Amino acid sequence: MSVSISGEGTSEDVWRGWAAPREWPELDLEAAGVALTPVVVAPHPDDEVFGVGGVMTVLGGAQVVAVTDGDAAHPGAGAYSPAQLAIMRRFESAQALRRLGLRDSAVRTLGQLDGAVDEKSLTKELEGLLRPGQWCFATWRGDGHPDHEAVGRASAEACERTGARLWEYPIWMWHWASPDDPRVPWHRARRITLRTGVVEAKRHAAAAYESQLRPLDPGAAAPALAPTMVERLLRNYEVVFG
């Protein structure tokens, strides 16, 4: 999908004033009886926590698939090489999951090129992980970021082939879209309301991604993720498209 993800995007105040999310069907994780550990597919380290950190906490675990190391997030960061950024982001992801209380959660790092996800190989990788009926959370196919959309398409194909249950979580959509935006499949939206303790755990986990939340170089004007973006992703509910 061709969209603009520049600027500050739609403010959280605008989203907060929209009544529709309060009417979306609730995805009751505690009553769902999820038998198999869910698979969470993240295009870059941090997407898993910002997108479904609350879901992982409530379900008590996840198999996280980090497709890329996010080493292209700071193209002008002369103080760090891509290899150093990759190590940094892997460390941040492990720390974030520990902060969610998911110490037993494995992270499968694929090391694909940031900005050039290989959908075919990712689909094959996911086919080897997924089982019939297993829940798979992946970024939405219409999210507006090429890596996010590629991951969404590959995950959808793998779920179709294996009989796994796909749930798509939006990240950048909250930036470029607006309430009632016709480009978004709101009719497929499911809401996961997060208890206060879960919200606090998610916020603590998100803070582990220092490389994304602060400028890496002394001369950098802004962090990779603006505070307005972070605010949209750390509200007291999460959304998936089913």
Image (spheres, grey):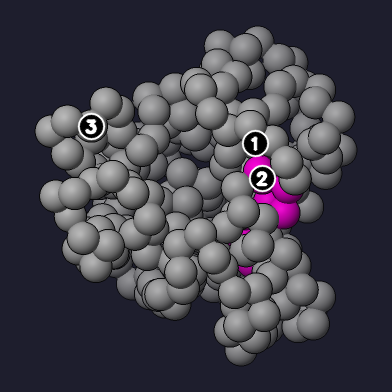
- Say which mark, if any, is on residue 143: 2
Question: Does 113 appear above or below 231?
Answer: below
**What kind of residue is marked 3?**
Ala
- Is 51 positioned to the left or the right of 160 in the image? left
**What kind of residue is marked 2?**
Asp
Q: Is residue 11 visible?
A: yes
Residue 70, how many percent across, how many down? 38, 58
Mark 2 and mark 1 in contact? Answer it, CB < 8 Å.
yes
Residue assigned mark 1: 173
Quarter of the picture containing the N terminus is top right
Q: Who comes first in sequence, dot 1 or dot 3?
A: 1
Residue assigned mark 3: 220
Q: Secondary structure at mark 1?
A: helix
Check residue 138 for magenta coloring. Answer: yes
Q: Secondary structure at mark 3?
A: loop
Question: Does 166 appear above or below 131?
Answer: above
Magenta-highlighted residues: 136-144
Tag 3: Cα neighbours inside 10 Å, few (<14), some, or many (≥20)? few
Residue 113, how many percent across, how many down? 46, 69
Tell which of 205 and 172 is nearer to you. Answer: 172
Question: Does 98 appear above or below 27?
Answer: below
- Say which mark, if any, is on residue 159: none
| Separation of residues labelled 3 and 2 (CA atoms) | 27 Å
Question: Does 60 appear above or below 154?
Answer: above
